[in-house]
Image: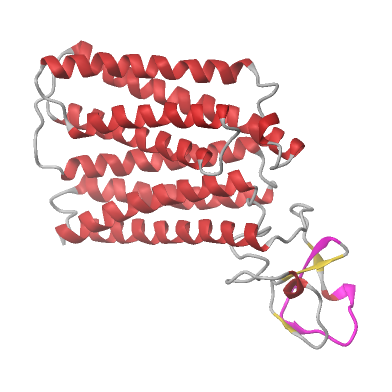
Amino acid sequence: MKKRYKLFLRSSLVLIYLVIAAGSIVRMTGSGMGCPDWPKCFGYLIPPTERAQLDWKAVHSYEKGQVIIVAESLRVAPKDFISGTTYKAENWEPYTKHDYALFNPTHTWIEFINRLLGALAGLATLLLFVSSLFRFKTDRLAGIFSFLIILGMGFQAWLGKTVVDSNLLPYKITVHMGMALLLVLLLMYLLARENDSRPTLPNTLVFKSLVAVGLVLTLIQIGMGSQVRQFVDDQMHYWGLDAASKWLAEAPFLFYFHRSFSLLVLAVHGLLFYKLWQNKYLPPVFLSILLLIGLEILTGIWMYYFDFPFSSQPLHLVFASLLFGAQSYFMIRLIRQE
């Protein structure tokens, strides 16, 4: 059962990172409203592939919750019924949560895959919790934290619904991302506890403080990045996807501060590198942290100077999430060596 617990733990972590990556692709491609309802997509478990599937059809069996598009607005079947030979408005209810009624098959399937990965992540965390119950007598913390993760996944799913219902309000997207990072932190704690080795890390107050400061600086950097991303999203909607060179033409001060702030994150970890070098031990996770900081800076340069190439935004976000996870793991391991 211990092997199964570790398998579900690692699977949960990998799937949550895949959800973060998929979410960034959804946002970059403007696919967030590809499925205008939640949890289904146009009222279907498997979304439509062409616009004709959302037209009203005569003598057709409709199920409760299925959606059609009439006069550029959504209509929802309030119950199961078979349509007649002519459209009758009284058989349908308007979709009142928003007025977005466009169908783009590419956007729909990108959003659907994002939701599917979310469902798989939810299943993995559920299996993690079940497996933790078999070791509850000897390891209650595993069960408690696994249960908190289940609650977090439920809250995250509800946040996803509110994001769709609000027609992608930027601050709700940011909260959604913040919750994903909290789940990563909880999973990293469980993963660190499963590592039996005890690393010999500097046990000084200065070193511990630098590790904590590095993590806090990364969180601030991610927070500023989400605000910059909201500005870019507004510019993207204003100028269109084909005018990426104009998205940062009138960038706010926060963008330049965010860009320069990365050097402070790098400097703090440069000091940590020096301390570890003096200690004659460079943990693989810390080397990963340095690599991820470098990749974050490089993808930021890539976006700015090359007008947001297709994969640059998702990679920038994924690297930031991986960096946060690696720093969290490193800090937890440092605390647990005491």
Residue 151 is at least partly visible in this image: no
Residue located at (73% from left, 77% from top): 79
152 inside magenta stretch? no
Magenta region, residue range: 72-90
Position in image of residue 11 (x %, y %):
31, 55
Tell me if 272 is positioned left or right of 2 in this view: right
Task: Give the residue at x 26% y 39%.
Answer: 189
In terms of image quadrants, where is residue 56? Answer: bottom right
Question: Residue 105: horizontal and vertical position, in percent?
Answer: 66, 63
Asked if residue 119 lies left or right of residue 74, the reply is: left
Q: Residue furthest front?
A: 306
- Total marks shown come to 0
User: Based on the displayed image, in which of its 4 quarters is residue 244 positioned?
Assistant: top right
Quadrant including the N terminus? bottom left
Residue depicted at 76% across the width and 74% down the height:
52
311 on left or right of 6 = right
Residue at image coords 69%, 23%? 249
| Quarter of the figure that contains the C terminus | top left
In x, y percent, where is residue 113?
Answer: 52, 60
Q: Is residue 192 left or right of residue 77?
A: left
In x, y percent, where is residue 175?
54, 37
Q: Quadrant of residue 293?
A: top left
Is residue 160 visible to us here?
yes
